[in-house]
Structure formats: structure tokens, C-alpha cells
């Protein structure tokens, strides 16, 4: 009985000390530390992460319900959190180089949330929404969206139409100036120089494929593209890629110049017989000219070849097989 009484008194004493320590922790934290951190946050206008009064109350309950173990847990957790902050890191071997820094730009969530295809936006009745979409389109890759921006010229909202006209006017004027400049360089080049042709061909194709010019100007520019292809073909035909041939073929077919388009299709087939473009260009040409026999022969040759077929061409084969 004596030992049991001593153990009980020791246990009660331990619980009393634990309760006093937990109560002091609650009072100091809730009445001194937390309000001080709050005042600091409001004074400096910055976000300060600190334990609020509710956190101190929850820890107080844990300390009371788990005598000794609870306080020791929070004490050692505090030490493990603070030890890295007290020690000075050794930066002797650390090298800071701007070349290794990759800047991560924060996404413009508000802008992305409001992005919809401009073709659909043309049916929006709210002028403010249409203007916002137009401005977001202009802020993006304008060169790839000229065909879409051109649709906004017919908008009932005058401000949206003004945005579209301003952008198109500036981009097309720059394009015409660059075409004239590069064409002049091509005329002044020697037979060994091909840099201007290699620059002008993809540049013109990016604009012509969007059909942003009048029919007359589209034909004129397509002929300039063909002349550029011809110049490069005469200087060094090996520099012409299947993409170059395909671009001039499609642009010529667009203006219904099927004779010239067939000539370049045959050149493509002769130089790159085992490419998909050599077949698709001829298929589009024969389909446009309603040459049924040539179309079916080309389609049959494509099925028997080892050329890798894309989904669009595969669907074409399924339709006509």
C-alpha cells in the first residue's frame, strides 16, 4: 500500500507539472506570441505564417491528454524544425550561374480562361467579350492567326473590326516589304547563293496558306513563290525538300493553275518517290482535275508502297477502296 501510494502521488505530481507546463504554453502562445505575429503581419503588409490561437489550444489538449509524451513530441519537433535555421550553410562549393537559371513564367490564367476560337467568338453578342478574345488572339502568335483575324473584319462591332484591320494591315505590309526585299536579293544573287530562296519559300507559304489576300494578289504572290522555287531548282535542286514542293503544288492548285501544279508534282515524285507528299500531291491534283484513272492508279501505287500513311490519307484510302 505504501508503494502504491507513493506511485500515485508521483503520478499526480507529474500530471500537475504537465498541466502547468501545458497551461503556460497555451497562455504564452495564445496571448503573447500569436498576437505579436499578427501585429507584425499587419504592420509589414506581408504574409507571415504563424500558429494561431486555435493551434495552441489543440496542442494544449494533446499535452493534457498525453502527459509527458505530448510536450516532448512538440519540443523535439520544434528543435528539428529550428536546427537547420540556426546552422550556417557552407556555400563555398556553391556556384551561382545565370546561364543555369530557367525562368518559369506564371500562366496567365485569366487570359487562358477566356480563350475560345475566334470563329466561335464571332457569334458572341457581347461586344466586350468579343473584344477581349480579339485582344488575346493579337497577343498570341499573330502570324499563325491571320486567317482567323480576317474573319473579324466582318464583325458588327466596329472596335473589333478596327483591331482586326490594324493588325492585318501592319502584318501584310511587313510581309509585302519582306517579299520585295528577298526577291530583289534573289535577282542579285550568284548561281551559288541560295540563302534568300531558302528563307523566302517557307515565309511566303506561311502567309499564302491562310488566304488573307485578294484573289488577284494571291495569284501574283503564288507566282512569286513558284519563281523562287524555280530559282532554287535551277541552282541546286537537292536543297528542295518535299515540304517545299508540296507548298508550291498546293498553292498553285488553290489558284487553279493545274498545269504548273502537275509539273511540280512530277518533279516531287521524281526527286522524292518514296515520300507521302509525292502521293498526296498527285491525289489532290487528280481529284481536283477529275482525272479518275490517274487518281485510282496513284492510290493503288500508294497502297502497294512502303510509305508510312497518316490518318487523313488512310481515311481517303478507305473511302475509295
Image (cartoon, helix red, strand yellow):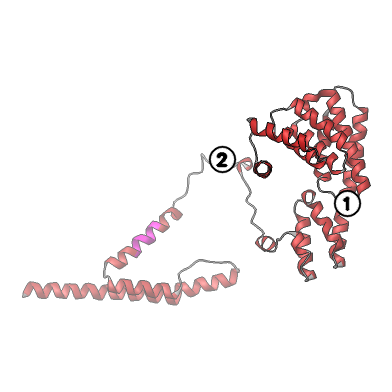
Q: Which mark is residue 95?
A: 2
Locate the N terminus and report the quarter of the image it occupies. Answer: bottom left
Question: Measuring 69% from the left and 42% from the top, which residue is drawn there?
Answer: 320
Q: Residue at x 72, y 33 (%)?
A: 298
Sequence-earlier tag: 2 or 1: 2
316 magenta-colored = no
Query: Left or right: where does residue 15 sit relative to residue 313?
Result: left
**Residue at position x 80%, y 28% in the image:** 267
Q: Is residue 138 above or below residue 205?
A: below
Q: Position of residue 275 (x, y in %)?
A: 69, 31
Q: Is residue 193 visible?
A: no
**Visible residue check, residue 208:** yes
Indicate the quadrant where residue 113 lies.
bottom right
> CA separation, marks 2 and 1?
46 Å
x and y percent of residue 87 in the render?
Answer: 44, 51
Q: Secondary structure at mark 2?
A: loop
In the picture provided, is 152 more to the left or to the right than 78?
A: right
User: Quarter of the image holding residue 192?
Assistant: top right
* Residue wearing tag 1: 170
Rendered view: 223 above or below 53: above
Q: Is residue 76 magenta?
A: yes
The residue tagged with tag 1: helix, strand or loop?
helix
> Which stretch did the figure color magenta?
74-80
User: Which sits in the foreground, 249 or 213?
Assistant: 249
> 304 or 309, which lies in front?
304
The residue sitting at 53% across, 66% down in the picture is: 48
Please identify the quarter of the rendering in which residue 311 is found: top right
Relative height, residue 39 to residue 184 (above, below): below
Q: Closer to the camera, 31 or 73?
A: 73
Amino acid at each position: 500500500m505504501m508503494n502504491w501510494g507513493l506511485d500515485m502521488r508521483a503520478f499526480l505530481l507529474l500530471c500537475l507539472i504537465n498541466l502547468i507546463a501545458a497551461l503556460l504554453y497555451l497562455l504564452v502562445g495564445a496571448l503573447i506570441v500569436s498576437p505579436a505575429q499578427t501585429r507584425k503581419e499587419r504592420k509589414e503588409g506581408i504574409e507571415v505564417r504563424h500558429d494561431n490561437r486555435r493551434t495552441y489550444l489543440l496542442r494544449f489538449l494533446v499535452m493534457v491528454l498525453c502527459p509527458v509524451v505530448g510536450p516532448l513530441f512538440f519540443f523535439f519537433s520544434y528543435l528539428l524544425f529550428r536546427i537547420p535555421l540556426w546552422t550556417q550553410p557552407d556555400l563555398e562549393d556553391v556556384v551561382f550561374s545565370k546561364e543555369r537559371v530557367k525562368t518559369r513564367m506564371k500562366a496567365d490564367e485569366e487570359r487562358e480562361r477566356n480563350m475560345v476560337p475566334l470563329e466561335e467568338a464571332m457569334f458572341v453578342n457581347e461586344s466586350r467579350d468579343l473584344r477581349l478574345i480579339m485582344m488575346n488572339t493579337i497577343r498570341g502568335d499573330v502570324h499563325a492567326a491571320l486567317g482567323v483575324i480576317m474573319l473579324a473584319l466582318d464583325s458588327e462591332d466596329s472596335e473589333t473590326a478596327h483591331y482586326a484591320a490594324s493588325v492585318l494591315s501592319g502584318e501584310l505590309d511587313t510581309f509585302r516589304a519582306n517579299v520585295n526585299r528577298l526577291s530583289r536579293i534573289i535577282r542579285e544573287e550568284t548561281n551559288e547563293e541560295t540563302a534568300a530562296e531558302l528563307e523566302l519559300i517557307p515565309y511566303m507559304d506561311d502567309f499564302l496558306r491562310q488566304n488573307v489576300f485578294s484573289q488577284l494578289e494571291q495569284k501574283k504572290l503564288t507566282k512569286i513563290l513558284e519563281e523562287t522555287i524555280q530559282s532554287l531548282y535551277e541552282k541546286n535542286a537537292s536543297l528542295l525538300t518535299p515540304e517545299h514542293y508540296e507548298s508550291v503544288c498546293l498553292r498553285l492548285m488553290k489558284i487553279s493553275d493545274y498545269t504548273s501544279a502537275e509539273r511540280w508534282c512530277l518533279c516531287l515524285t521524281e526527286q522524292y518517290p518514296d515520300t507521302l507528299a509525292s502521293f498526296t500531291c498527285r491525289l489532290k491534283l487528280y481529284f481536283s482535275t477529275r482525272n479518275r484513272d490517274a487518281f485510282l492508279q496513284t492510290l493503288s501505287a500508294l497502297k502497294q508502297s512502303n510509305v508510312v500513311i497518316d490518318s487523313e490519307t488512310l481515311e481517303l484510302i478507305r473511302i475509295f477502296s
